[in-house]
Amino acid sequence: MRVNIGELLAARGAIRTVAYSEWVESPAEDVMLLQPVTGELVLASTGRSVCLTGQLRTQLTLYCGACLAGYEQPLEFAVAEEFRRALPLSAAGAGGERELDADDFVVLVGPDDTLDLTEIVRQDLVLALPIAPRCREGCRGLCATCGADLNLGPCDCAGDSADPRLRLGVPGFAGLPARRITEKE
């Protein structure tokens, strides 16, 4: 969905509301959108720039980071961006090092004054995804030894580790004599 903000940039205080309902490209291989991203976006002119704000929602299929089961999850996320026209190269100043200011975090709009809202929404959707998704609170995950789903009950390996050093009762580092480090070392 593309929106021209040329008129908004010219009229300080102007506001435009956009009903958003679009299918967005899946942000990752293991994330599937089950319905379009929907919500309302507000474009407001400050005179120098246009602020885009809104609340959007969708339904996703994710995979649990503990047990690897697929599950559906609603996702609601905020959009907040600021846009302004790009300055001509002669007015942009010379290159080199300089300290960043607030203007450096404003997205520049090309000469056609058009925004691609779908790409902006996709980027904000990526930022809203959970880092370590869980199918439910208290998910016990998979056994590290045999891979059994511990949510279904205890596994047959009874916690035996493939690495004998990790078994309970086997002296490992705990069996080493204590050694103090002195200042000379």
Image (cartoon, rainbow, N blue to C red):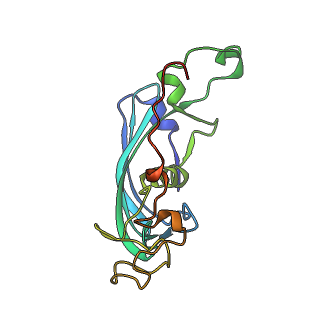
Q: Is residue 55 left or right of residue 124?
A: left
Is 111 located above or below residue 16 in the figure? above
Is 8 located above or below residue 174 in the figure? above
Residue 1 location in percent, x, y? 53, 56
Q: Nearer the viewer, residue 15 or 178?
A: 178
Total count of labels: 0
Q: Nearer the viewer, residue 105 or 18?
A: 105
Residue 20 location in percent, x, y? 41, 58
- Residue drawn 45% across the image and 36% down it: 8
Residue 107 location in percent, x, y? 54, 35
- Residue drawn 48% across the image and 48% down it: 176
**In which quadrant will I find the C terminus?**
top right
Hey, which residue is sitting farthest left in the picture?
Answer: 137
Residue 93 location in percent, x, y? 67, 14
Hey, which residue is sitting farthest front in the picture?
Answer: 177
- Residue drawn 48% across the image and 23% down it: 182
Is 161 located above or below residue 176 in the figure? below
Q: Nearer the viewer, residue 141 or 134?
A: 141
- Residue drawn 40% across the image and 71% down it: 141
Give residue 34's quadrant in the image.
bottom left
Is 109 located above or below residue 102 in the figure? below
